[in-house]
Image (cartoon, helix red, strand yellow):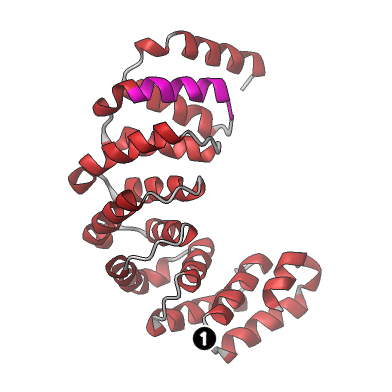
C-alpha cells in the first residue's frame, strides 16, 4: 500500500477514533497489524478508546485487538489488563479455539504472565480441545511454555489431543509442540514417541529444515529422552546439509 495513503489512513483513524465502535477499533488494529505496520500513535489511540468501550468488546474483537498489539509488539499494560478482565467475563462460552489460541499467543508474545487469564484460557481450552486444530494446539501450549505457566489438566488434555492429531501436524506445529513439552518438562512418552516418528519421517522426505531439526533434537536432549533413531536421523541430515545450518542450529545440536 502507498505510504502516503497509509499515513492518511492513520491520521483519519486517529481523528475519528471517538466515532468508532468496538468492532471498528478492532478492525483498524487488525488491518495495520496484518500489514506489519507499527503505527504507535494510532495504536495508542486505539488503546485509549478501547479502555472506554471495553465492556462492549465481543470475543472476536477482544482476540483480534490483543493479537494486533502483540503482532506489532506494542506493550500497553492498562490496555492488556482491561482486555484480560473482559476476556475473563466472556471466555467460558464465546471463544472459539482459534480465539483462545490467539489470545494466549498475544500475552506470551508480549511476555505478560497474567495468571488468572491463563488459568481461564486453560480451562476453556480443555473444554474445547477436541475442536482445536493442530495450529491451535501448538500455539496454546507454546504460549503457556513461553511464560512458564504450568497447568497440569491443560497439559494433559492438550497432550492427549495432540497425540490424536499428530499425523495432521505441519512441520512448525510439530517443533513448537516438542519445544513446549521440553520447556514445561512434560514426560508424555507416547506423545514423544509419536513426535520422534513424525520427525524422522519428515527428515527422510526432506521436509524438516535445519532449524527445526536442531530444535527437535534439543527438545529431546533437554528432557533426557534418549531416542537413538531420531538423533541418527538428525545427525544424518546435518551432515548432508551442513552448509544450511546457522550458528544457533549447531549450538542446539551440540
In the rendered image, residue 190 lying in the magenta stretch gets the answer: no
251 vs 134, nearest the viewer = 251
Q: Position of residue 156 (x, y in %)?
A: 31, 72
Q: Residue furthest left?
A: 93
What main secondary structure does the magenta stretch of the protein show? helix
Q: How many marks?
A: 1
In the rendered image, residue 39 lying in the magenta stretch gets the answer: yes
Q: Quadrant of the N terminus?
A: top right
**Which region shows up in magenta?**
38-51
Left or right side of 188 for 56: left
Residue displayed at 38% across by 56% down:
136
Tell me if residue 91 comes above or below residue 47 in the rendering.
Answer: below
Q: Is residue 206 visible?
A: no
In the rendered image, which residue does mark 1 sit on? 225
97 vs 166, nearest the viewer = 97
Left or right side of 27 for 97: left
Amino acid at each position: 500500500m502507498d505510504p502516503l495513503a497509509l499515513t492518511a489512513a492513520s491520521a483519519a483513524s486517529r481523528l475519528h477514533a471517538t466515532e468508532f465502535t468496538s468492532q471498528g477499533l478492532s478492525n483498524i488494529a487488525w488491518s495495520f497489524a496484518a500489514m506489519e505496520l507499527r503505527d504507535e500513535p494510532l495504536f495508542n489511540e486505539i488503546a485509549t478508546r478501547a479502555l472506554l468501550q471495553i465492556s462492549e468488546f465481543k470475543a472476536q474483537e477482544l482476540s483480534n485487538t490483543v493479537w494486533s498489539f502483540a503482532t506489532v509488539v506494542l506493550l500497553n499494560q492498562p490496555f492488556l489488563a482491561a482486555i484480560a478482565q473482559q476476556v475473563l467475563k466472556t471466555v467460558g462460552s464465546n471463544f472459539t479455539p482459534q480465539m483462545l489460541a490467539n489470545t494466549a499467543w498475544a500475552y506470551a508474545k508480549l511476555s505478560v504472565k497474567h495468571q488468572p487469564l491463563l488459568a481461564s484460557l486453560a480451562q476453556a481450552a480443555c473444554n474445547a480441545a477436541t475442536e482445536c486444530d493442530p495450529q491451535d494446539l501448538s500455539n496454546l501450549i507454546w504460549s503457556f511454555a513461553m511464560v512458564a505457566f504450568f497447568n497440569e489438566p491443560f497439559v494433559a488434555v492438550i497432550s492427549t489431543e495432540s497425540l490424536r492429531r499428530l499425523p495432521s501436524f505441519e512441520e512448525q506445529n510439530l517443533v513448537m509442540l516438542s519445544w513446549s513439552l521440553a520447556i514445561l518438562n512434560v514426560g508424555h512418552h507416547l506423545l514423544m514417541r509419536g513426535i520422534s516418528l513424525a520427525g524422522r519421517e519428515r527428515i527422510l522426505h526432506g521436509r524438516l529444515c535445519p532449524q527445526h531439526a536442531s530444535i527437535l533434537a534439543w527438545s529431546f536432549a533437554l528432557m533426557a529422552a534418549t531416542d537413538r533413531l531420531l538423533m541418527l536421523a538428525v545427525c544424518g541430515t546435518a551432515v548432508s546439509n551442513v552448509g544450511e545450518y546457522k550458528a544457533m542450529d549447531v549450538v542446539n545440536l551440540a
